[in-house]
Image (spheres, coloured by chain):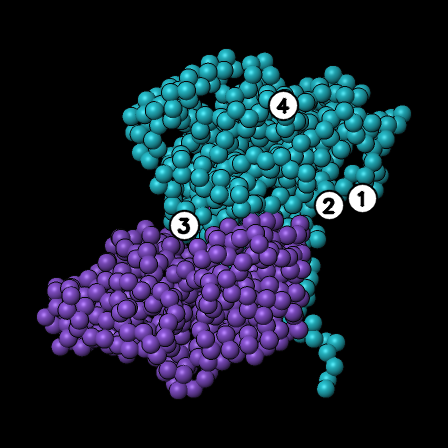
């Protein structure tokens, strides 16, 4: 017979959900801004999120002006967290956020209910799967998302296959192409449905070109074969509408298919709360304080929008930590906000609302790659600011600062790519 | 049969029970609308469905009588509904009623139709859980279950039958052939080669749980005029997913059911017709199963189940397609009655009809969750984040009575891996448990059966033969 136990209720000023780069930076910033009563909830048995499995370098260039590996980058923040004596719970999974900001958490120590004044969402993102893109064929062993393969290889020393095809040229996909090659596997092709790579140009150079790994643009995997283990995949060219065509189809013999076909902010937790989500990013709608549609609930990092570089996650999370502390101390000033709209050529822009009271750094992504591209900010027909870029790429986040003096008098704000 | 003092062996060629037809179907408890009165399908379906509430409770398998609407979108289809209602009533189905489009709208706000046939007692059940539970209960009551055992040959001998298998030779008085997709081949081993099964693949799409509010009951079209096919329908699952499917396509290869581009498109089109606002970006998985049809593709009317003693003490169960799941308990009862004609069956006094089941963390209240964790801290360690499955449940699933220690064994017992991440997040954790708690070597970790290795070894393994330059 199971004895009835109580839910462990705790009152806490700030709950940070997720102990990855966003959660760590948000917690450190909140603490530095005077919040003593805070806790990080982390579902894994380590801090740092995805970073410990990212053993390649290139992290920290923006913040530290050094190229660190993922574990090194994470450790700098973990050390600071420990120095600041910020509490965290590992192996602990936030199950639910209620409308009155109670956070239910399952952990081996018990079922907790944190009654929070403010919450920072920092749950990161997950990978799009084979099921979601409905690749036809059988369902054998040997189909992995690139991040899962990275976890298994780099953290568990498990080798996922010998003959590999990678679908999708996202950053993790390209990095895994190199990693698997270094481990002695043969990467037969990286297949990309778009006419350009879907990851950072530097990864295209350093991971594919430098290792002579074939990149097949405007192609996709149209069938997976094999009963128990993958034994081949069919690849087909696609037309302009990205539909596969039968012409020039071919089979590649392989034992593994890796998928790097997109990342999705992991927002299921807030679907029971009143936070409204932006279909363009998969994350919450936020204002310049990174506050969501629910007052006192903030979002930062990949759960808000998928970032290209972890340094930007850190910087964004620091702002979320500061905003949350202002909110908790009652120093947040609410004022009339206007909506920021993404116009033609822009996939999304953040924040979604601004109050015109301070300088604001906007993050945006373009829809298509291009050279000599100008991006303009408009109030109705009036052009407020133009920024010129030598090169733009959808995989690369663009940051543009708007001065308070520029926005003070505006009635609307729309950003678009200028023809 | 485990109720009686009989020595029983259940032989399964795969690594786990419920591996074939039983796992990949809609999981519907049918009421009996479609089958000709007097047929075994009609009789056993109605009888079987009535047995389910008690049986599922005893076996501790969740089920729900969510009801079903067959919708008519043309005047012709409205007439078809009348026919279906008459057939159903002749088969003894209770509570059938034809409702108007407006009435339907009250129960199913997202469905448009002229009228609908409502069947209140139709239900849903996870078919794999039911099958696993039945096997576990049989095992507890003395049945020996041999997995990874393939029957190679059957010979008639004086005392009964001699079965040659990959795990040795067995002698038995009675054989029940319930080999599903391979029932025709098993029958042929003993010379009864008059049966031929026509494998008919059905593909499905699965929607995320966050779509659960779109429908409250099963939504079926009027069956297309193809033998034994019910048409692409929408089935809510107990956990809140929506299942779209199945298609119907005769295929040659019974193994390795695949999905196809054409059928995925057909499913999407079919689903849109039933539920125009279906959010297709919420598809999380595509899969397929294969029906064991005894009806040839060219025949218009669906043939009945074959459940008969074709040779003395050799019972064939062939062509058990839909409504096979619903009928299963009634089929079992019928087979017991047939066996009882041949041998004396004495009931065991210690037969235990109840099966214990690990309480799923996700299914209970927060208070009960708190209690579960304090009784066992591993209940507080969530392995599968999409379905909120705890380490305790995963451990119990891996400790299953058939020693089936695969990723699939965990998936079908706990739902870990059935969610929107397709098992990406829980896989490394389950792999960890398999290595640490069960001492299984990396290259011995399988996805589903014994030949589906997840790994080729450990890292650096492939480079061992590299020459140092």
What's the chain of the residue with tag 1? B
- Asked if residue A26 is positioned above or below residue A257 in the image, the reply reads below
Q: Give residue B141's mark.
A: none
Sort mark 3 into few (<14), some (14-19) or many (20+) by Cα contacts within 10 Å: few
Q: CA distance from mark 4 to mark 2?
A: 36 Å
- Choose mark 1 or mark 3, whichever is in front: 3
Q: CA distance from mark 1 to mark 4?
A: 37 Å
What's the chain of the residue with tag 3? B
Label 4 SS: loop
Q: Give residue B299's mark.
A: 4
- Choose mark 1 or mark 4, whichever is in front: 4
Q: Position of residue B179 (x, y in %)?
A: 70, 34
- Choose mark 4 or mark 2, whichever is in front: 4
- Please tell me the colour of chain B: cyan
Give the mark nearer the N terminus: 4 vs 3: 3
Q: Which residue corresponds to mark 2?
A: B148
The C terminus of chain B sits in image quarter: bottom right
Asked whether residue A196 is in view, the answer is yes
Q: CA distance from mark 1 to mark 2?
A: 8 Å
């Amino acid at each position: 017979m199971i004895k009835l136990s109580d839910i462990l209720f705790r009152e806490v000023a700030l709950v940070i959900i997720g102990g990855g780069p966003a959660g760590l930076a948000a917690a450190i910033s909140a603490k530095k801004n005077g919040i003593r009563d805070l806790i990080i909830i982390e579902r894994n048995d380590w801090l740092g999120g995805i970073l410990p499995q990212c053993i390649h370098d290139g992290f920290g260039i923006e913040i530290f002006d050094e190229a660190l590996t993922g574990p090194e980058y994470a450790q700098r923040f973990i050390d600071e967290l420990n120095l600041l004596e910020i509490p965290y719970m590992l192996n602990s999974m936030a199950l639910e956020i209620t409308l009155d900001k109670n956070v239910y958490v399952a952990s081996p120590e018990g079922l907790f209910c944190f009654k929070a004044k403010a919450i920072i969402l920092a749950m990161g993102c997950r990978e799009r799967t084979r099921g979601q893109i409905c690749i036809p064929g059988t369902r054998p062993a040997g189909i992995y998302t690139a991040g899962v393969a990275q976890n298994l290889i780099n953290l568990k020393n498990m080798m996922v296959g010998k003959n590999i095809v990678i679908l999708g040229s996202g950053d993790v996909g390209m990095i895994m192409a190199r990693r698997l090659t270094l481990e002695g596997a043969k990467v037969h092709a990286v297949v990309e449905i778009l006419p350009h790579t879907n990851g950072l140009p530097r990864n295209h150079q350093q991971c594919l070109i430098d290792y002579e790994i074939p990149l097949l643009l405007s192609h996709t995997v149209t069938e997976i074969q094999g009963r128990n283990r993958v034994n081949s995949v069919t690849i087909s060219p696609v037309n302009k509408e990205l539909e596969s065509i039968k012409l020039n189809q071919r089979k590649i013999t392989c034992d593994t298919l890796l998928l790097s076909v997109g990342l999705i902010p992991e927002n299921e937790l807030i679907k029971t709360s009143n936070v409204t989500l932006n279909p363009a990013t998969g994350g919450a709608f936020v204002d310049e304080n990174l506050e969501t549609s629910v007052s006192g609930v903030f979002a930062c990092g990949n759960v808000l929008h998928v970032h290209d570089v972890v340094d930007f996650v850190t910087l964004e999370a620091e702002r979320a930590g500061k905003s949350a502390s202002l909110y908790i101390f009652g120093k947040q000033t609410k004022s009339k906000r206007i909506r920021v709209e993404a116009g033609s050529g822009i996939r999304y822009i953040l924040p979604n609302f601004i109050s015109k009271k301070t300088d604001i750094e906007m993050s945006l992504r373009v829809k298509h790659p291009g050279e000599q591209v100008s991006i303009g900010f408009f109030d109705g027909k009036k052009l407020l600011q133009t920024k010129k870029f030598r090169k733009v790429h959808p995989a690369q986040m663009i940051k543009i600062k708007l001065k308070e003096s520029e926005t003070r008098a505006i009635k609307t704000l729309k950003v678009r790519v200028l023809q | 049969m485990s109720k009686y003092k009989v020595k029983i062996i259940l032989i399964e060629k795969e690594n786990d029970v419920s591996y074939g037809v039983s796992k990949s179907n809609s999981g519907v408890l049918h009421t009996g609308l479609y089958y000709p009165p007097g047929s075994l399908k009609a009789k056993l379906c109605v009888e079987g469905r009535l047995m389910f509430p008690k049986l599922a409770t005893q076996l501790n398998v969740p089920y729900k009588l969510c009801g079903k609407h067959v919708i008519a979108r043309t005047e012709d289809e409205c007439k078809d509904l009348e026919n279906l209602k008459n057939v159903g009533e002749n088969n003894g189905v209770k509570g059938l009623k034809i409702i108007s489009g407006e009435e339907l709208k009250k129960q199913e706000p997202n469905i448009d139709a002229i009228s609908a046939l409502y069947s209140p007692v139709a239900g849903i059940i996870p078919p794999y859980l039911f099958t696993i539970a039945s096997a576990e209960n049989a095992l507890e009551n003395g049945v020996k279950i041999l997995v990874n055992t393939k029957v190679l040959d059957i010979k008639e001998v004086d005392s009964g039958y001699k079965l040659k298998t990959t795990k040795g030779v067995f002698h038995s008085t009675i054989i029940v052939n319930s080999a599903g997709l391979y029932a025709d081949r098993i029958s042929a081993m003993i010379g009864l080669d008059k049966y031929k099964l026509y494998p008919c693949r059905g593909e499905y799409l699965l929607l995320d749980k966050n779509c659960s509010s779109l429908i409250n009951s099963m939504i079926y079209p009027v069956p297309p005029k193809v033998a034994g096919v019910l048409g692409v329908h929408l089935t809510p699952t107990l956990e809140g997913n929506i299942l779209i499917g199945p298609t119907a396509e005769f295929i040659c290869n019974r193994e390795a059911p695949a999905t196809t581009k054409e059928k995925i498109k057909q499913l999407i089109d079919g689903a849109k017709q039933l539920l125009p606002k279906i959010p297709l970006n919420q598809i999380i998985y595509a899969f397929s199963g294969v029906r064991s049809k005894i009806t040839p593709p060219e025949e218009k009317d669906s043939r009945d189940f074959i459940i008969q003693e074709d040779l003395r003490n050799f019972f064939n169960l062939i062509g058990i397609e839909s409504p096979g799941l619903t009928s299963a308990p009634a089929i079992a009862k019928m087979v017991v009655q047939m066996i009882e004609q041949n041998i004396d069956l004495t009931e065991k006094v210690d037969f235990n009809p109840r099966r214990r089941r690990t309480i799923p963390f996700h299914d209970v209240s927060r208070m009960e969750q708190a209690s579960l964790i304090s009784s066992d801290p591993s209940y507080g360690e969530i392995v599968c984040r999409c379905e909120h499955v705890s380490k305790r449940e995963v451990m119990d699933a891996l400790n299953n009575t058939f020693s089936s220690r695969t990723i699939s064994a965990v998936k079908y017992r706990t739902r870990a891996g059935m969610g929107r991440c397709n098992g990406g997040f829980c896989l490394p954790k389950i792999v960890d448990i398999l290595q640490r708690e069960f001492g299984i070597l990396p290259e011995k970790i399988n996805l589903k059966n014994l030949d589906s290795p997840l790994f080729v070894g450990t890292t650096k393994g492939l480079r061992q033969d590299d020459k140092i330059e």
